[in-house]
Structures are given as structure tokens and as C-alpha cells.
Image (tube, helix red, strand yellow):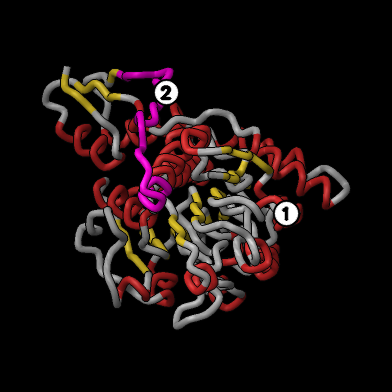
Amino acid sequence: MRIVADENIPVADVFARHGELKRLPGRALATADVRDADALIVRSVTRVDAALLQGSNVRFVGTCTIGTDHLDTAWLADNGIAWSNAPGCNARSVVEYVLAALRLLSMRRQAALAQRCFGIVGAGEVGQRLANVFSGLGWSVLLCDPPRQHGSKAPGVSGCYGQQFVSLDELLQHCDVICLHTPLTLDGDWPTRHLLGESQLARLRPGSWLINAGRGPVIDNTALLGTLRQRDDLAVVLDVWEHEPVVDPQLAALCELATPHIAGYSLDGKIRGTEMIYRAFCRHFGLEEGASIVYPAAEISSLAAGGSLTAAQLLQRLPALFYDPLTDDAALRATLLLDDAGQRAAAFDRLRKQYPVRREMQATCLCLPTGSSALQQAADALGMPWQVV
């Protein structure tokens, strides 16, 4: 069996248990690279459609990502090619990115997070987990997701503490923190491309914070640039960009935080994605999985919380121990000083390819004093294991 995989997928060597594995740059994959392959393992940077696979031997496509907008799933189905994604694989990582961004904004803007109203657009794996965290911390949350409002919740994720769905107009009217976590869809009843355009951006409440860690084209970046030039009361965090890997330096300059599409780039999330696709690959071809994938031990295996620590202080301090978004912000801004757009695009991809190890909170156990029910509730909301010592 011949398997082609994106070179940036971690622990992809597990696929070599079952055949010849070739690892190549995902964004540059071409027809000739996959013509003789039986399976193709990708990330979101590879467009998988007829242009890539027509006439190839590929019978299974796995994407080690939550999203599938880079797969032409209709064409794959019509041509008898099985496909699988990894729903929820990096959801915890994205949630922790958002929490770190919120901590930064609350410090810079001198605003108490508990006093703001949070609006989440897109209640899939990431959106529902984020809603559960916010609700678990006692924060006010509204959800907007028309497809799920008329369907069901994301698989494998508990409901959002009874949260009711609202329209996008209602969410923009009532919320002063907007978090975008939708897939990118171009058609259907609820397309998400330019979901936030000039009209919607104009309706943002005074002093609103806008965070996009979903898909870049969900916000009309040209309209956003115009809005930010007129309104300095807004704070914007962008991890995704409409024309990736090209980032508009003028837009980035007006963002409170600008990062190179790495919100979901925890080591845990990456390995989890590979593991999920490897299992789907084995099921499809009727193969034995063999030994389980081993996650490396965290450098910090446990943390002790003092008896005087409050839940609010825990929330302020924990994200900083695991992830500092300003490091990624500085790295991206340095690339935007390059004169040539092509060089900036290549630098964007290098930042992602050479991304340093980042672990999730769940890899570390929080040691709590007895009688710390508020801290236990906060740890549960954050998805962090804890024990009383």
C-alpha cells in the first residue's frame, strides 16, 4: 500500500506500519504526487478535489482537522473515495487560545470578563466546548448556529448548559465579545463566507471584542479594515485570515492580537487528529491498528494551588502558564515587515511548520487544597484534571 501524507502531520509514521509512506509539503501537493497512492492524509492547507485526485488510485482521504471545507466531499462520494475528518481533535487547543486572548484583552482594556456578555457564532466542537467553559465559569453566553438550531448538537460534546440559540442580529445587539467558530460554507441555506460584512461590523456594540479563530473568510477582511480605521473602540483578535497564507499588514497593524492560524496547534491536538485519522484509515482498509500512539509526558505534570487562590485568580493565571499568544503575535508581525507578498506568505507557512511544542491544560494535574469547591468548579470548566491534596 502507498500512503501520501502532509509532512507537517505529527506521528504520521504510524501509517508506515501498513505500507510505503511518502511525506510531502501539503500546500504544494500535485496530481503527480498522489497518482499512485492508495491513501492521502492531509491538513487544511491541501485542497482535495477532482483537480488533485482525478485518475489517481486514492481510495481513502483523511484530514487531521476538524474542518472539511478543503475537501470536495460530494466529488469524493461520487467517485467512491472514502473520507474522514477528526472532529474535536484540537477543540481544547482553540478554547485555550481564546481564553489566553481574553485574558490579554481584559488586562489591556481593564475590563472584568465576568461582566461581559459572550456571543459564540458556530456551536460545533469548538463552539460548544467554549460555551461550556464560559457557562461553567458563570459567564453570560449566547449562541448563534442556525444549522444546529434546526438539527442536533455536535457529536461527542455535551449540550451547552441549556443555552438558547439566537439570530446573528440578536447576538450582535446583546453581546460585547464575539467569538467566531463556524466552518466555511459557500452555499446552502446558511453560507458563512463574509458572515460578518460591512453591515454586521457596523452593528458591533461600542467597545466590543471580536475574535476569529475559525475560518478567515467568515469575516470580510476589507470591510473589517475599513471598520477598524473608523472605530478605535473595537478590539480584534485574528488567528485566521481571508487570503491565507497572505496576511494584510494594514489589517494586522490594527488588530489587538494577530497570529498565524495556530489556535489549534497544541501538540496534543495534532497527535489526537493523527490518531483519529489513523483509526479511520485502519477501519476502512480492514487493518489491525497495532500499538497505541503514545503522547509525550508534559514538562509540567502537576501544579499546586494555594488555599487563598480565588477562582477568578485561577482563570487569570492558568492560561499564561500554558500559552502566551504575544509570542506568536510578535513572530507574525516580524514577517509582515518583508516587502514581497510571496516572501510573507512563505514566512507564514514556516511559522506553522516550525511551530514550537505547546501542551494543553489537560496534560497537567491541578493540586487543590481541601474545601476548594469554587476552584474545583473552575478547573472542571477549563477541562483540567485536579486532585485534592
State the residue position of label 2. 296
Seen at 36% across and 74% down, the residue is 147
- Residue at disc 2, secondary structure: loop
Asked if residue 23 is positioned above or below residue 129 in the image, the reply reads: above
User: Which of the 4 image quarters holds residue 150?
Assistant: bottom left
User: Which of the 4 image quarters holds residue 386?
Assistant: top left
Quick one: which residue is furthest to the left in this view?
Answer: 371
Q: Is residue 296 left or right of residue 354?
A: left
- Disc 2 marks a residue whose amino acid type is Pro
| Residue 85 in magenta stretch | no
Per the rendered image, the range of residues in magenta is 280-303
Residue closest to the eye, 115 or 388: 388
Closer mark to the observer between disc 1 and disc 2: 1
Asked if residue 336 is positioned above or below residue 234 in the image, the reply reads: above
Residue closest to the eye, 105 or 353: 353
Within 10 Å of disc 2 (Cα), the crowding (few <14, some 14-19, many 20+) is few
Mark 1 vs 2: CB contact within 8 A: no
Pinpoint residue 118: horizontal percent, then vertical percent.
38, 58
State the residue position of label 1. 32
